[in-house]
Image: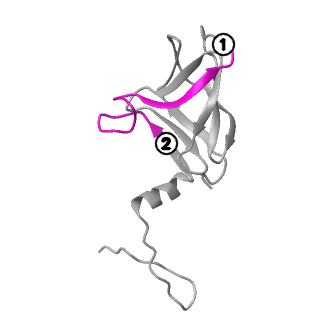
Amino acid sequence: WEITGVQLEVGRNATEFEHRSFNEELALCYRYFVRMYGATATGGGLSTGDGGIATLANWTSTSAYGPIFMPVEMRIAPSLSDYSNLVYYSAGQTFTASGSDVQLAGAATNRVEVRLNNMTNMTQGNAGWLRVASTAGYMEFNSEL
């Protein structure tokens, strides 16, 4: 059997049933976990198979820094829990991140500062674009209990 639309409350007085829209419920979930995907043919990014996440600045020829803004205010400053298929493009150079190449330099409840390490041939002072480079790629931020 199936049951739905049940609300349990403490005390003797019942209150109105709480109805939330899908978007409200999703925003509440994003307070704990955010997964940024690569684009798909049906949406989710700016171009098929490639989702832009952030613009970064090349701090040195081997590292870049920049902010990533969360879709909602998270419960606490999130950690970077995992990533896959991240590529950084800067002035004709391409850097594919792996292992511990991506780290958080700082975090707040509404944004993180990401740092890319171990790059080569980048020009200090240039900017670049961090992208999820495939439909299977992602970047995950976690602020769960």
Which residue does the image show at 53% across and 82% down from the upper left? 9
User: Main structural element of the magenta stretch: helix, strand or loop?
Assistant: loop
Residue 51 among magenta residues:
yes
**Residue 78: which numbered mark, if any?**
none
Asked if residue 45 is positioned above or below residue 116 in the image, the reply reads below
| Residue 42 appears left or right of 114 | left
Residue 18 among magenta residues:
no
Q: Callout 1: 10 Å neighbours few (<14), some, many (20+)? A: some
Residue bearing mark 1? 124
Residue at the limit of the structure toward the bottom, as seen here? 12
Q: Which of marks 2 and 1 is nearer the N terminus?
A: 2
Rendered location of residue 12, percent (x, y): 55, 92
Rendered location of residue 25, percent (x, y): 46, 60
Residue at the limit of the structure toward the top, as seen here? 121
Disc 1 is placed on an element classified as: loop
The span picked out in magenta is 36-62
Viewer can see residue 135? yes
Asked if residue 19 is positioned above or below residue 33 in the image, the reply reads below
Rendered location of residue 100, percent (x, y): 62, 26
Which residue does the image show at 43% across and 26% down from the upper left? 133
Q: Callout 2: 10 Å neighbours few (<14), some, many (20+)? A: some
Quadrant housing residue 59: top right
Disc 2 is placed on an element classified as: strand
Q: Which of 107 and 124 is in front in this view?
A: 124
Cα separation between marks 2 and 1: 30 Å
**Residue 35: which numbered mark, if any?**
2
Mark in front: 2 vs 1: 1
Rendered location of residue 71, percent (x, y): 52, 46
Q: Nearer the viewer, residue 91 or 98?
A: 91
Q: What residue type is labelled 2?
A: Arg
Q: In which quarter of the image is the C terminus?
A: bottom right
Q: Which amino acid does label 1 sit on?
A: Gln
